[in-house]
Image (cartoon, rainbow, N blue to C red):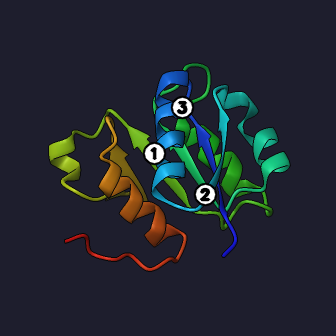
Amino acid sequence: MNQSRILIVDDDPNISRLVAMLLVKLGDHRVCIENRPYAALAAAEKFQPDLILLNVDMPGKDGGEVATEFRADPRFEKVPILFLTSLVSPNEAADDAVMRGGMPFLSKPVNPQALNRTVKRLLGQPVHAVA
């Protein structure tokens, strides 16, 4: 099975490293981290992600602006985007991603099981229930 390529765009290096470690531990993923939102498109050009994890609240350029750039680029317009945000509480998100404006959101701090289920679903991989 080929490794899924996941780009993480988050201005907080600690959070992006933690999410990257979770993704590598939970699945067969290659991960690229970009901590500068204005460099996200260039990072995607080099890495060619299958999925983009995008922080919402970042200085200089927020996640919505970055997502708009990805959607305007034919190379990335169909790449799924999962927003990670502290603006949605864990209670609002429950155990899985919340849909807002047609886009999935997971709350920070990220629940590893919810991250795993949501990433698999967005990548079109089977999601197995954990006993």
Q: Percent from the top left, x then y, of residue 92? A: 18, 48
For the residues marked 2 and 1, what is the alpha-carbon distance in whole angstroms? 10 Å
Write the residue at 45% across / 56% down.
26
Pointer 1 residue:
22
Give, as a three-letter code, the residue at label 1: Leu
Q: For residue 102, say whether it is visible.
A: no
Towards the viewer: 8 or 29: 29
Residue type at mark 3 is: Arg
State the image coordinates of residue 104 (x, y, percent, origin top left): 40, 57
Element carrying mark 2: strand
Position of residue 93 in the picture relative to residue 72 (left or right): left
Whether tag 2 and tag 1 are in contact, CB under 8 A, the answer is no
What is the x, y in percent for residue 78?
A: 66, 68
The residue identified by callout 2 is: 29
N-term mark: 2 or 3: 3
Kind of element beneath mark 3: helix
Q: Nearer the viewer, residue 111 or 36?
A: 111
On residue 17, the disc is 3
